[in-house]
Image: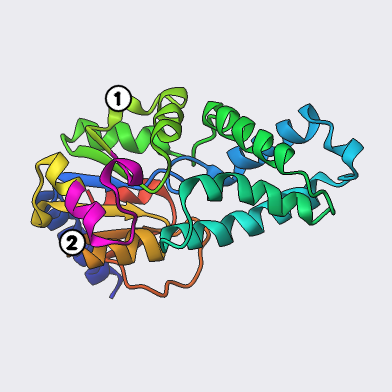
Amino acid sequence: MQRSNILANHISSYFAAMQYRHLFFDLDHTLWDFETNSKETLNDLFHNNLLINRGITDFESFFAHYTHHNHRLWDRYTKGFIKQDELRWKRMWLALLEFKIADEPLAKKLSVEFLNILPSKKRLFPYTIEILNYLQNKNYVLHLVTNGFESVQHNKLRESNLTSYFNQVITSEASNSLKPHKEIFDYALLKAGASLSESIMIGDNQAADIQGGINAGMDTIFVNHLKIIPTVKATYTIEHLKELEGIF
């Protein structure tokens, strides 16, 4: 039984290597460690702006409230209920309100500083550089499809020395669409000059990346860093980036 499973994996890997040419990656939470980088950035803001003097004595609590509101507002943003600017400052505003700080100018100041500092952070998931080199050396064409903001995402790539790996960087701003909507994937394929049959989407977010890829008719790889139980069936599921070597 074990031998037959190994053989099946080899056959699957062989056909994947033959089939795909264009690999579309998500950036945040897939390659670029958003949670760690975001927490470091918020810690910088906490100390630089002396928030402890405003009554926020526990940074971990501040980070937890910010994370909660950020996730909730991102969900509303991806569904088209709020605009980009509202997302940017209201996540700070709502986090401050948890500590009874109703200071809109401070929230907007923190928002600007957050987006200035965040892209300078360089934490990547383990094996990110190694797998990108591996795939590039095997002549795959690599691209990014991200819901992140245009300038912020390009700055992240530059500061993390990732820019040279990607042929096209497709953002929600440039495409005027958001994952999981089909339009952003259509735009990505057009920009890359790629067909669906030779393309695959690789990401950590089941709603945006996996369901989005499925909506576009694209094969998908769920990067399950958190080892959760999948609720959307991807073509492949991995728990570590090194496992991509078994597919390509």
Question: Residue 72 lies in what quarter of the image?
Answer: bottom right
Depth order, front residue of 10/222: 222
Give the residue displayed 89% in from the left and 44% down from the top: 57
Q: Which residue is mark 1?
A: 164
197 with respect to 96 (left or right): left
Q: Amino acid at mark 2?
A: Ser
Q: Residue 140, how many percent across, how many down?
A: 18, 38
Q: Which residues are magenta?
A: 170-187
Task: Please report whichever mark, 1 or 2, sits nearer to the chain's N-terminal start.
Answer: 2
Q: Residue at x 9, y 50 (%)?
A: 18
Q: Residues within 10 Å of mark 2 (few under 14, many from 20)?
A: some
Amino acid type, callout 1: Ser
Q: Where residue 122 sits: x, y (%)?
A: 53, 29
Residue at 25 percent across and 37 percent down: it is 135
Question: How many angstroms separate mark 1 from mark 2 (CA)?
Answer: 29 Å
Residue 109 lies, in percent from the top left, at 67, 33
| Residue 102 percent across, percent down from the top left | 79, 49
Give the number of the mark in front: 1 or 2.
Answer: 1
Image side of residue 245 versus residue 120, left or right: left
The residue that label 2 is drawn on is 12
**Residue beneath the point at 34% across and 26% down:** 163
The reply to whether residue 6 is in sight is no
Q: Is 168 included in the stretch rendered in magenta?
A: no
| Residue 173 located within the stretch drawn in magenta | yes
Colouring of the image: rainbow
Quadrant position of the N terminus in the picture: bottom left
User: Which disc is residue 116 wearing?
Assistant: none
Q: Is residue 15 visible?
A: yes
